[in-house]
Every structure is written in C-alpha cells, then in structure tokens.
C-alpha cells in the first residue's frame, strides 16, 4: 500500500482550511510534480572529487581507436578522533576518461597534479580466468576535469607558457600596448 505521506491522505484542498496559503501552495506543487513523474529524477549518479594524481596517467586506444586514460586520484580527509587528536585519511579513486578527455589527460596531467574531476561512479564485473571467481572494479568515469595547480610537473610532452613567461611578456610590453588584452571581459 502506498504511504499517503504527512497529510494522512487528505487532499491539498482540505489542508487549505487548516494551514496558511504558503503550505497549501507547497503541497499542491509537490503533488503536481509527483503526479507527472518525469520531472523528478528517480536517481542521481554524480561524483565530484578534488585531489592529487597518484602516478602518471596511462593512455591506451581501444580496438576501434577510441582513446582511454586511466589514473589514480588521492583525496584526503582530516578529522578529530575520539581522543580529540587530528587524524588524516587518504582515499584512492580509480579514474577513467574517454575520447578527447583521455587525450587531454595524457597531454596535461602528471603524477602530483591537483585536479577537479566530475563524473559518475561505475562498477564492472568479470570472471577471473585463472581462479574462476567473480571480480569487481569500481571506478569514476570522468565527464569533466580541471587542472587546479600550476603545470610544474608538466604532463606529456607539451610545455605551455608558465607564469614566468607571462610576466616577461607583460614587462616587455611598451606603455602604448594594452596589457589587458588577455582579459576576456
């Protein structure tokens, strides 16, 4: 049997005589959204991580030529234990990136890079060929990522301009040149 909720099965109209108009509008709105069904998501699978890359990413290509990058990301948590002592816990996450994002990871991400990763959690299973037992792997499938720190560790062969290069360019600008050309607004 369906749980009638906090109004014990009464309609929004019967609540009108007993509550203020704000409550009635909220109940009606909620009831309308539930009735339509498609407006409220049934579930959400979203992961946001900020951490440091554990080792240089491994970029491979599938049989169809699709690039895929795998790397580990460490997140740290600081908390006080029962004795009021600070403790630190590190959690390691397996990250996988596909297509253009995988190429970007291979080019710009290296061990120690600080990253913001947004994606979904995914668990896959397979049967081990040697033991015959069922194995599981849980990983984060990246949809988006941002490099948060300087590119000092320099992922891949690409060496982009450093902040020192930008400072040199600014100091070389003459007084008639506009230094603000790089500002996008």
Image (cartoon, rainbow, N blue to C red):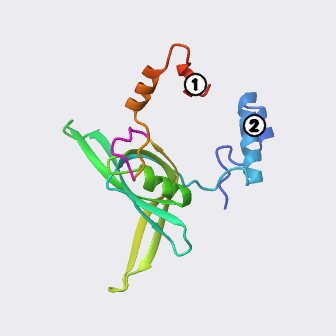
Count of numbered marks: 2
Residues at marks 1 and 2, CA–CA distance in whole angstroms: 61 Å
User: Is 150 contained in the magenta span?
Assistant: yes
Q: Nearer the viewer, residue 14 or 159?
A: 159
Region in magenta = 148-156
User: Percent position (x, y) of residue 78?
Assistant: 29, 40
- Quadrant showing the C terminus: top right
**Secondary structure that dominates the magenta span:** loop
Can see residue 120?
no
Left or right: 137 as drawn, with respect to 130: right
Quarter placement of the N terminus:
bottom right
Say above or below: 148 vs 21: below
Which label lies toward us, 1 or 2? 1
Report which residue position mark 2 lands on. Answer: 15
List x then y, in percent, for residue 94: 39, 59
- The quarter holding residue 183 reads top right
Near-viewer residue (177 or 9): 177
Q: Residue shown at 32%/56% (left/top)? A: 55
Q: Helix, strand, or loop for circle 1?
A: helix
Residue 170 visible within the image: yes
Question: In the image, is 74 to the left or to the right of 22?
Answer: left
Q: Is residue 52 magenta?
A: no
Residue 8 position, x and y percent, is 68, 47
Please give the name of the residue rendered at 55% of the width and 21% of the height, measured from the top-left corner: 180
Percent position of residue 3, x then y: 65, 54
Q: Is residue 173 above or below residue 90?
A: above
Up-down relation of residue 105 to residue 170 (above or below)? below
User: Which residue has dot 1 on it?
Assistant: 181
């Amino acid at each position: 049997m369906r749980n009638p909720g906090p109004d014990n099965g009464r309609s929004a109209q019967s609540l009108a005589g007993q509550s203020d108009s704000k409550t009635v509008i909220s109940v009606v709105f909620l009831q309308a959204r539930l009735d339509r069904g498609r407006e409220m998501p049934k579930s959400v699978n979203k992961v946001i991580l900020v951490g440091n890359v554990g080792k240089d990413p491994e970029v491979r290509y599938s049989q169809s030529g699709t690039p895929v990058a795998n790397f580990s990301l460490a997140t740290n948590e600081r908390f006080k234990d029962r004795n009021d002592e600070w403790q630190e816990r590190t959690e390691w996450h397996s990250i996988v990136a596909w297509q253009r994002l995988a190429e970007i990871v291979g080019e710009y991400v290296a061990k120690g890079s600080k990253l913001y990763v947004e994606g979904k959690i995914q668990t896959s299973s397979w049967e081990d060929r040697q033991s015959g037992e069922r194995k599981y792997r849980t990983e984060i499938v990246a949809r988006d990522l941002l490099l948060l720190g300087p590119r000092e560790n320099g992922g891949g062969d690409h060496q982009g301009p450093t902040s020192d290069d930008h400072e040199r360019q600014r100091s070389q600008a003459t007084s008639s040149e506009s230094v603000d050309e790089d500002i996008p607004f």
